Image (cartoon, coloured by chain):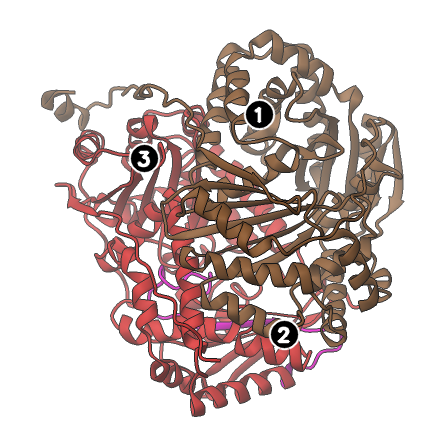
């Protein structure tokens, strides 16, 4: 733009065009090194030297673990070993800028952490001590039991938690995924001996995957892992999960929470695993529907109607199956209208092909956010670990990107018809039944039950 | 044992600074390790600057900055960012408001265009205003009104500690005030605070400095020049007598308490401020920290505990007056007085004996990891450098923080702990209204 033109702009505003994008940078998948140790542990190392840190993720499959015991196992795993108290473990990790935390879900037990890269050996050494010698001391277990009970009680006072719990129960029935938070009484019944037994049975290297990402040469990271973790041995149950059951549509489940100022709206739809031929097109269809801000659903119920703050929909992948969940917290008085618009947007995408420009926008977003997700050590570590947990490696990213690039309007329209149709949806609404039941009942059959943890 | 002291590493992100003729300050920090960029525009206006009768206005206005601008229809901003493969957001703080994008690097010029366009002027219409008042009310319902411990303690402690409207009021705003907001208010607010001279642009990541400089000049060069408004003095005297409040949270199942003490000026007295930032971590970072070991593990009077400087938890983006905060959740029937007494006792012990051998060094090593981890994210660098430029004229401080944290001494931490006396303390207790 010339200087003269610029000068005129201050007087009369002429439209300025949005600059085009530069050429797309090809997706560069970082190289990984991998080694299977003698004890069966798979170690994957990826180098990203940006900051002098290293990220660690240890995935241990734990399908069919007793819910309360498993949750307590994660809560107390770092509470002491033969040689170290919980405080000592924390202090020794801190000394190398490190920290470890444990978490569990129906698929896996996960130890994750990060430290200064100079502390990698020490962090691995401490982790090995925990894996081979966690003692679950009586005093610490009692403390952590009470803390966990309190935390569950706080969770149970949160609408989002209650809505998710009701949704999982509704869609998974008797499958292990149906309950993911134990009841306080179940937690209170867990004794240290049961944790030691569970640890011996389930914390073993055979099917575990360790991911290390950071400012370290991959071969050196593999050597460090081998040195620290070769002594971790043992085998036990792996606990194969049965496939998740298909969704069974039925009456809307209205979970009554009297006095709610908002309703929690949840819609579950069928989905497929990452490797399924429909997966890339389904991701694009999900984006167009509600998977990002510039989606039909968000533009409708937030930016046009102001019913809600942060609606979003997401394909959730678990080992035994995948599901698409759309979630919004909406004002009580517009609960019916919000559901109507949700059903409308799902139905519209399932019956009318998206516009090519809508698809291009979603495609760019999907491809761009792949780049963003890989651009930090922490993001790369979590992605590598999640992929490894479903048997994939980072090179699958290139294949996924190619599938995203290739999916056409017809492909997306076809998967939308098959997966996003409102006829296949399972809907749960948590809110003040007295105020929202009339409008919801006008839209279809409703079954009401009281809120329960 | 005497802990081995980990050497605190540093980053060396290059920093280029310049100021355009219209007063816009610019920071560029290239790093070509991944093909992504972070773009941040920070305006020097926040919750403290909103007028009486307009609580929540700074945040509401942040929403309005996404509703279209000189050359962009409503929704266009979102679509142009996400259609370029990027993500965006904005957030309102006590002392600033930020707008930012993370994008693949081929979208640099587009991102600059989008930010420049709304710096020239957002489309402030009655329809957009009403729509966003509704959206903000839902945001407040989600984050405060229907959530147990909503707004605790960041909204509920300032009115105990402070006396003046700018420091004490609810930054999310009352529904009455939000509904009273007018388009004329918004236009005034924009004219006064969203001036080129009151803003900083930072771009990080996969950029060529010469090319980025030219693009910045092309897109921001003709943003009309307006000077920064005078920043009022928000100072308040320190407390001389303890303040204590309690309120019932109808949704909360368990008691909680938060306590705060004023700290030195984060900008003009950084050397004396930094020890408080370290002290907060010595007290609460992890199972080996003073207060977690004592209150959670030994006494079991607390089930979770946090400590930090700045009401929103970031010590490097606030101005004076601010505070060191501790917050604790208690078991059923927990005794808040006892918890506060124990905190006093532990602070006394630290003030008398100083940190134990290795205690400070391990805390500093962990803080270095946290700081480095934040800067690994391309957007983290842009945002932080923009704020450091705005508040201190020193974006390169980001590279120095791990080292400076590492240079804080036992004696400085001891001296800081000695100032956290009960008579300087403001605290607020949450009485559970949903007890079983």
Circle 1 Cα neighbour tier, 10 Å, few/some/many (<14 / 14–19 / ≥20)? many
Q: On the rendered image, what quadrant is the N terminus of chain A found in?
A: top left
Q: Is residue B57 toward the left or the right of residue B237 in the image?
A: right
Name the residue beneath numbered marker 2: A85
Q: Assign a secondary structure to mark 3.
A: helix
Q: Are marks 1 and 2 on the same chain?
A: yes
Q: Alpha carbon of mark 3 to alpha carbon of mark 2: how far?
A: 52 Å
Q: Which chain is brown?
A: A
Identify the residue position indicated by label 1 in the image: A287
Which chain is tinted red? B
Main SS of the magenta part reads: loop
Disc number lying in front (1 or 3): 1
What is the crowding at mark 3: few (fewer than 14 residues within 10 Å), some, or many (at least 20)? many
Q: Give the number of the mark in front: 3 or 2.
A: 2
Horizontal and vertical percent for residue B345? 54, 89
Does A361 appear above or below B89?
A: above
Marks 1 and 2, the one that precedes in the sequence: 2
Residue depicted at x 82% and y 27%? A247
Q: Could you say where residue B391 lies in the image, as x and y percent from the top left?
A: 27, 58
Residue interval drawn in magenta: B311-337
Element on which disc 1 rests: helix
Task: Estimate the x, y position of residue B133 in percent, counting from the top left.
Answer: 52, 43
Q: At 21% from the left edge and 23% from the top edge, which residue is drawn?
A: A12
The kind of secondary structure element at disc 2 is loop
Mark 1 vs mark 2, foreground winner is 2
- From the viewer's perspective, is A141 left or right of B192? right
């Amino acid at each position: 733009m010339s200087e003269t033109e610029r000068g005129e702009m201050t007087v009369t505003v002429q439209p300025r065009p949005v600059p085009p994008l530069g050429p797309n940078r090809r997706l560069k998948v970082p190289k990984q090194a991998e080694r299977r140790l003698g004890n069966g542990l798979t170690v994957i190392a990826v180098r990203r030297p940006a900051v002098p840190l290293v990220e660690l993720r240890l995935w241990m499959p734990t399908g069919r673990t007793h819910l309360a015991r498993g949750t307590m196992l994660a809560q107390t795993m770092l509470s002491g070993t033969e040689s170290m108290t919980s405080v000592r473990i924390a202090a020794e990790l801190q000394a190398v800028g490190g920290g470890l935390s444990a978490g569990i879900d129906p698929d896996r037990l996960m130890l994750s952490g990060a430290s200064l890269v100079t502390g990698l050996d020490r962090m691995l050494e401490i982790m090995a001590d925990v894996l081979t010698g966690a003692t679950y001391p009586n005093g610490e277990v009692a403390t952590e039991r009470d803390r966990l009970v309190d935390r569950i009680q706080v969770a149970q006072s949160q609408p989002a938690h209650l809505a998710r719990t009701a949704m999982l129960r509704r869609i998974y029935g008797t499958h292990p995924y149906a309950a993911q938070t134990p009841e306080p009484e179940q937690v209170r019944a867990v004794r240290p001996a049961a944790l030691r037994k569970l640890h011996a049975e389930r914390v073993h290297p055979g099917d575990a995957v360790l991911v290390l990402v950071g400012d370290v040469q991959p071969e050196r990271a593999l050597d460090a892992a081998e040195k620290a973790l070769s002594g971790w041995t043992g085998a036990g149950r792996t606990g194969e999960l049965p496939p998740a059951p298909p969704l069974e549509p039925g009456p809307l489940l209205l979970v009554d929470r009297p006095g709610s100022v908002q309703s929690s709206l949840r819609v579950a739809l069928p989905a497929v695993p990452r490797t399924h031929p429909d997966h890339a097109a389904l991701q694009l269809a999900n984006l167009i529907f509600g998977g990002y801000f510039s989606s039909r659903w968000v533009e409708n119920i937030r930016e046009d109607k102001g019913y809600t703050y942060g609606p979003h929909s997401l394909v959730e992948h678990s080992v035994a199956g995948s599901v698409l969940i759309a979630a919004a917290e909406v004002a009580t008085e517009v609960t019916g209208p919000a559901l109507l618009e949700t059903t409308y947007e799902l139905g519209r995408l399932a019956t009318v092909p998206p516009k090519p420009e809508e698809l291009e926008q979603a495609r760019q977003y999907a491809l761009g956010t792949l780049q963003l997700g890989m651009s930090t050590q922490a993001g790369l570590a979590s992605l590598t670990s999640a992929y490894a947990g479903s048997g994939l490696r980072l090179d699958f990213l290139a294949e996924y990107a190619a599938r995203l690039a290739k999916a056409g309007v017809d492909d997306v329209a076809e998967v939308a018809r098959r997966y996003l149709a409102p006829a296949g949806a399972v809907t749960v609404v948590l809110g003040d039944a007295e105020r929202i039941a009339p409008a919801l009942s006008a839209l279809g059959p409703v079954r009401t039950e009281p809120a329960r943890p | 044992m005497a802990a081995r002291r980990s050497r605190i590493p540093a980053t060396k992100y290059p920093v280029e600074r310049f100021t355009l003729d219209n007063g816009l300050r610019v920071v560029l920090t290239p790093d070509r390790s991944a093909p992504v960029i972070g773009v941040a525009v920070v305006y020097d206006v926040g919750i403290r600057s909103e007028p009486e009768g307009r609580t929540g206005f700074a945040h509401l206005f942040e929403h309005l900055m996404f509703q279209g601008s000189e050359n962009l229809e409503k929704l266009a901003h979102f679509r142009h960012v996400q259609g370029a493969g990027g993500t965006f957001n904005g957030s309102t703080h006590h002392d600033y408001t930020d707008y930012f994008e993370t994008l693949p690097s081929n979208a640099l010029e587009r991102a600059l265009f989008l930010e420049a366009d709304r710096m020239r002027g957002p489309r402030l219409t009655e329809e957009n205003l009403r729509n966003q008042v509704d959206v903000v009310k839902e945001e407040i319902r989600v984050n405060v009104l229907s959530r147990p411990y909503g707004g605790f303690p960041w909204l509920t402690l300032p009115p105990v500690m402070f006396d003046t409207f700018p420091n004490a009021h609810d930054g999310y705003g009352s529904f009455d005030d939000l509904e009273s907001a007018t388009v004329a208010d918004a236009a005034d607010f924009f004219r006064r605070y969203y001036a080129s001279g009151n803003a900083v642009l930072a771009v990080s990541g996969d950029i060529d400095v010469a090319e980025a400089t030219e693009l910045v000049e092309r897109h921001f060069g003709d943003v009309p020049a307006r000077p920064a408004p005078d920043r009022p003095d928000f100072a308040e005297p320190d407390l001389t007598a303890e303040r204590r409040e309690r309120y019932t949270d109808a949704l909360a199942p368990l008691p909680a308490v938060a306590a705060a003490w004023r700290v030195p000026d984060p900008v003009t007295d950084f050397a004396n401020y930094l020890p408080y930032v370290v002290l907060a971590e010595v007290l609460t970072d992890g199972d080996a920290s003073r207060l977690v070991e004592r209150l959670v593990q030994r006494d079991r009077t607390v089930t979770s505990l946090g400590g930090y400087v700045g009401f929103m938890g970031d010590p490097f983006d606030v101005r004076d007056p601010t505070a060191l905060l501790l917050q604790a959740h208690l078991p059923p029937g927990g005794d808040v007085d006892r918890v506060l007494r124990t905190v006093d006792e532990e602070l006394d012990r630290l003030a008398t004996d100083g940190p134990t051998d290795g205690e400070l060094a391990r805390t500093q090593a962990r803080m270095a990891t946290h700081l480095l981890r934040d800067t690994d994210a391309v957007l983290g660098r842009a945002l932080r450098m923009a704020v450091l430029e705005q508040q201190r004229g020193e974006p390169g401080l980001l590279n120095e923080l791990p080292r400076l944290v590492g240079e804080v001494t036992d004696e400085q931490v001891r001296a800081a702990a000695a100032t956290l006396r009960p008579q300087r303390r403001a605290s607020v207790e949450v009485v559970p209204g949903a007890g079983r």
